[in-house]
Image (spheres, rainbow, N blue to C red):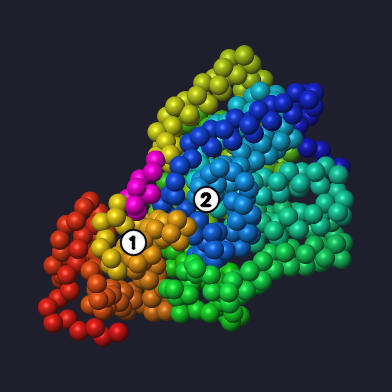
Amino acid sequence: MLTLLRSRREYQPTRQRYYGLAVLAFTLFIYGVTAPPAVHTYDSAELALGAHSLGIVHAPGYPLYLLLVNGFTRLPLPLEFAVKMHLFSAVCGALTCWLLYRLAMRLTSAEPLLAAGGVLVYAFAPSVWGVSAVTEVYTLHTALMALGLLCFLRWWAKPRRWWVYSLCGLFGVAAAHHLASVLVAGVLLTLIMLRTPVPRVWIRGTLLYVALATLPYLVYLPLRWLATPDFNMVMEHFDRNLTRPADLLWMMRGGMFRHEAFAYGPWGYLVELGRFVVALTWNFAVVGLPLGAAGVAVLWQRQRQLTLMLLAIFGLQVLVFSGYAVFDKWQMFHTAYLVWAIFVIAGADWLAEHSVPHTVRLATAAVVLLQMGVHWQGAAFFRDTSAHDRAVATLQALPPDALLLAAWTEAYPVRYLQAVQGARPDVHLYNYTSAATGLRDRYPARQDWVDRAWAALQQQINCHPGAVYITEVELVRAVYETQWVQPGLYRVFPLPGAVCTR
């Protein structure tokens, strides 16, 4: 039977637990205090709207996340709804760090203090810290991936059928949250099948995986569609019906973003891979790159199969998401960062073994402090109230029954104030970014959907009986007369004699 990598030193279980709990408590505290005290922008506001009404958000719908976070927000905490959602991300982020510590203690021979330091280097990487303090889906995903890896190592050390079924069930649940879990499940379950050549075991496991992965989508999305919740972005902007099997499958596989997947040519793809190397270097404070490479070499010498498994998971994450053409894709590499952190800890352990251990410990502590000091300003950005304040100022500046034309970054915080806090229900809101995405899904040719999106925007301006305002004046300034109201808000005047063609 192949053994795990941890073989050189053994440590007292109590000491290991104390360091693990310290990592959990410290990261939860830091993530919590750097969370914004109000609703945030980008996907955060949309997810808050979806969770508040148990509605339907962008693909693939995240049914498991919405159910869990909705339950979490019902806890009797003296916090605003959006802040509770930020706290849920912080809890999941801290759990990920604790599970990463457990993984490091099983996979490497590092002492608990050194392993804890390596975990904190990961915890305060800007891409990790940033989404651990705001409402996002990524920390729940990394927590499930870390738990899956830990369960896999338990099975690897002592293969039992019930571990196989547990892993299939766990990754089935993970797939009901985030489709990227397939990249990890595919590697681990393939290894399980190769080492467990019992057809009925992996056939049952596959059926369990498929059932748990699809059931939340098949139940939640159609039922919530029929319930007509306050927030349903698919019904509002797409010509789809999630009670129809074809449209439900479109939603589950992320069809609304099919244009962004594998969007680069060969040269552009190489450029994106280079950008990932730069991001990896920045997230691990430069020294993490050579330490991680050394860790790969060390683990390869001790246990090649497990090292190859980790490299396969890391490589799949990098290859898939490097080709994803969205501005916030750097938040999507967290599983790759999670695996690289294991390599970094193994490299630091090797360095401590072949040099002065006390010096390595002090250097690790210095890197942790450097991570916190350098990236604190970036994390402090997530503590501001700019999205909330801008939404409040916008609503205060609008007259009764006004129409606000806004991009999704401004539209969702405004809508959050209307839906959750009951502010200004008389204001009408048109999210032209999401509307254009819906038109692109219906009319894939670029010039076709762009022209239709512009025509739809003109209809909103020409057909609304009250005053019309817009957040990005560059969209209409060449055609319509505009008037500055305040930063980021302009009055739009319909063309003389314009006719509503709706």
Report x, y in % for residue 155: 81, 47
Going from the N terminus, do you reach mark 2 or mark 1 first? 2
Above or below 495: residue 379: above
- Asked whether 423 or 98 is in front, the reply is 423
Q: Amino acid at mark 1?
A: Ala
Q: Position of residue 317 (x, y in %)?
A: 56, 52
Residue 27 percent coordinates (x, y): 58, 33
Q: Residues within 10 Å of mark 1 (few under 14, many from 20)?
A: some
| Residue 470 shown in magenta | no
> Residue 444 location, x and y as percent?
39, 77
Numbered disc in front, either 2 or 1: 2
Secondary structure at badge 1 equals loop
Residues rendered magenta in the picture: 384-392
Find disc 2 in the rendering and name its residue: 81
Residue name at image x 64 percent, y 54 percent: 71
Q: CA distance from mark 2 to mark 1?
A: 23 Å
Question: With respect to residue 406, does 359 lie above or below?
Answer: above
Q: Quadrant of residue 61?
A: bottom right
Secondary structure, mark 2, is helix
Measured along the vertical axis of the image, is residue 41 above or below residue 432? Answer: above
Q: Quadrant of the C terminus?
A: bottom left
Which residue shows up at 13% across the image and 67% down it? 481
Q: Which mark is residue 407?
A: 1
Does residue 243 appear in this view? Answer: yes
| Residue type at tag 2 | Phe
Residue drawn at x 48%, y 29% is 371
Q: Residue at x 25, y 63 (%)?
A: 399
Q: Answer with the quarter of the image where residue 325 lies.
A: bottom left
Where residue 64 sits, quadrant-wise, is bottom right
Badge number at residue 312 = none
State whether residue 293 appears in this view.
Answer: no
**Type of secondary structure dominating the magenta stretch:** helix
